[in-house]
Amino acid sequence: MGKLLQVLSGFVTAPSSTQTPLGMGSGDSLQVKGNKDNSPVKLLAAWADNQTAGYLRIRSTRMHDAAQGIRLYSVASDVENLIPAGSMQRLFQGDVLIADLSGSATAGDIESAGVLLFYEDVTGSDAHLIKYDELQSRGLNVVGVENTLALGTGGGYSGSEAINAEYDLLKSGVEYALVGYLTSAECTTLGWTSPDFANARVGGPGNETEKEMTANWFARLARDWNLPLIPVLNGSNKGNTTIDGVQDENGTDALVISLFVELAPR
């Protein structure tokens, strides 16, 4: 099957209490990709990075209702998943999601949000993803790979560098499961892009305080949903695997440790 895990991010500037449509990050689109035989597409997670508390809404005519859809409340500086685990919110190919956000009224303040989608059988892609039980049966060693991201101030993706740019630790020919991450600074989204992930960006919320959440991000999603949601990287592709992030106008850099588990050969 053509599995795909994809994070999408967008932002608004000084929306105040008005629900304002997100401007999406470079390369991101809220149109659901084509999938084979109308196979399931799931909305796994959604989060917002607000400087003032506000609402994140995700809407579609195919959801429960088109007026409010999924209406979520985000407090200031609390970047974490707001979607209930295992809720199985289904999306449909070709549908264009409407995502909007409210928050700060201060001129220049960037408020932003992210969503994580899973395609069970997408057309033209096949990412290397595994389930939680395979992680348990094949896991050997934990390794943390550090990158310091020079994040920008424009609200889009920035700070991209190769996963081995600072610490070249992953072994060529060895498979590694990306189970989670740690970050030193709050940001909206942290993302990883690799040929092994079908050149899609996988990712999650940039929360510097809820370390138990981020350290287990992909592993916990896979366990909670019983789906193959743990990205697997071959060490031979480390130079072609990048990490980046989304930051607000304050441009705080983030030290990120990507948490991998070395996998035993099949």
Image: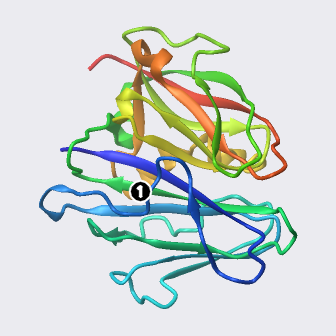
Query: In the image shown, does 193 or 146 lie closer to the viewer?
Result: 193
Label 1's element? strand
Q: Residues within 10 Å of mark 1 (few under 14, many from 20)?
A: many
Q: Where does the image place residue 32, in percent across and percent down from the top left?
A: 34, 62
Q: Is residue 241 left or right of residue 234?
A: right
Q: Quadrant of the C terminus?
A: top left
Number of numbered discs on residues? 1
Residue drawn 42% across the image and 8% down it: 172
Quadrant location, the N terminus: top left
Residue at the image point whose x is 49% and y is 91% from the top:
67
Q: Residue 104 sits in which quadrant?
A: bottom right
Q: Residue at x 41, y 56 (%)?
A: 117
Q: Amino acid at mark 1?
A: Leu
List x then y, in percent, for residue 249. Answer: 80, 52
Residue that extends furthest to the left in the rendered view of this protein: 37
Q: Nearer the viewer, residue 227 or 78?
A: 78
x and y percentages locating residue 218 in the rendered image: 49, 44
Identify the image's colour scheme: rainbow, by chain, secondary structure or one colour: rainbow
Q: Is residue 102 above or below residue 168?
A: below
Q: Say if 116 sits above or below 149 in the image.
A: below
Identity of the residue drawn at 55% across and 63% down = 46
Check disc 1 and report the residue beneath it.
117
Instruction: Identify the image quadrant of residue 93.
Output: bottom left
* Left or right: where 248 falls relative to 227: right
Percent position of residue 18, x then y: 70, 83
- Give 156 or 264, whichever is nearer the viewer: 156
